[in-house]
Image (spheres, grey):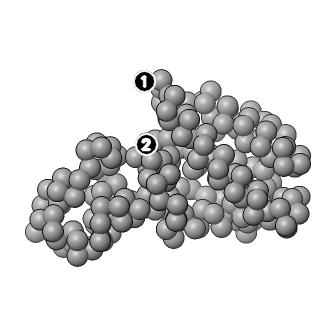
Amino acid sequence: MKHLDRERIVTAAVRLLDAEGEARFSMRRLASELEVTAMSLYWYVDTKDDLLELALDAVTGRMELPDPADAGRDWQDDLHALALAWRRAMIARPWALHCYGRFPHPGPHGLRFSEHVQAVLARSPLPDALRPTALSAVLRFLFGSASLEGRWTAPGRQPHDQEAEQDFHRGLGWLLSGMGMDASVRDRRR
C-alpha cells in the first residue's frame, strides 16, 4: 500500500471528479481508487464537503496568474488574463463551478486569486473606496457568466470555444465600463 497523505487524497479526488463528475463521486469510490478503506480517508479530511473544498482549491491553484507586482503591465490585460484563467478552469470542470457556488470561503489558492484581482484593480483608475465593490462585481460576473455558460453550453462544444470567450470578454468590458473605467472592449483571441 502506498503512503496516504492529504495531498495524495486531494490529487486523486480531483482526478476522479474530472473523470466522473461530482454526482458519481463518493468517499468509497475515492478509497477504492487509492486502494485504502473509506474510513482511512477520514484521518485526513473531516467530511466529503471538506474534501470537495480542498479539491476546488487545488484546481484554483493550477491557474496561471499574471504577476500582480508587475506595475508596467496593463491592468486591463491582467484583469482579462485572470478572468480567462478562472473561466477556463471552471468551465472545464463543472463540478468545480458547482462547488464554488456551494463553498463561499476560499482556500489559500482562492485567496491568492482574489489578492491578484485586488492587486490588478489597485493599478486601475478606480478610487480606493470603490475597489472592494469592483472586486465583488468582477467575482460575481465571473461566477454568474461561467454558471450560465456551463448550463447553456451545447453538447460537444469545447470549454475553450473562441466565440464563448469573445462573449465573455465583451461582458467583462461592459462591466468595467459600467464602473466608470475606460475599458475598451478588444477582441481577445487567446
Q: Does 43 sit left or right of 162 as displayed?
A: left
Q: Examine the image and state in which quarter residue 21 appears.
A: top left
Q: Position of residue 45 (x, y in %)?
A: 29, 71
Q: Residue 32: image x %, image y %?
A: 14, 56
Q: Quadrant of the N terminus?
A: bottom left
Disc 1 target residue: 155
Where residue 149 appears, as percent x and y from the top left, is: 55, 34
Callout 2 secondary element: helix
**Residue depicted at x 23% and y 76%:** 43
What is the three-letter code of the residue carrying label 1?
Answer: Pro
Q: Callout 1: 10 Å neighbours few (<14), some, many (20+)?
A: few
Residue extending farthest bottom: 43
**Three-letter residue code for mark 2:** Pro
Residue 17 in sight: yes
Give me the residue at 51% from left, 28% from top. 152
Which disc, if any, is residue 18?
A: none
Q: Which secondary structure, mark 1?
A: loop
Does residue 67 appear anywhere in the picture? no
Q: Residue at x 16, y 71 (%)?
A: 40
Vertical relation: 11 (above or below) 4:
above
Q: Quick one: quadrant of the C terminus?
A: top right
Mark pair 2, 1: CA separation: 13 Å
Looking at marks 2 and 1 on the same chain, the residue that comes earlier in the sequence is marked by 2
For the residues labelled 2 and 1, say whether their Cβ atoms are less than 8 Å apart: no
Marking on residue 94 = 2
Quadrant of the image occupied by residue 129:
bottom right
- State the image coordinates of residue 154 (x, y, percent, origin top left): 48, 23
- Left-right relation of 47 to 181: left
On screen, residue 104 above or below 189: below
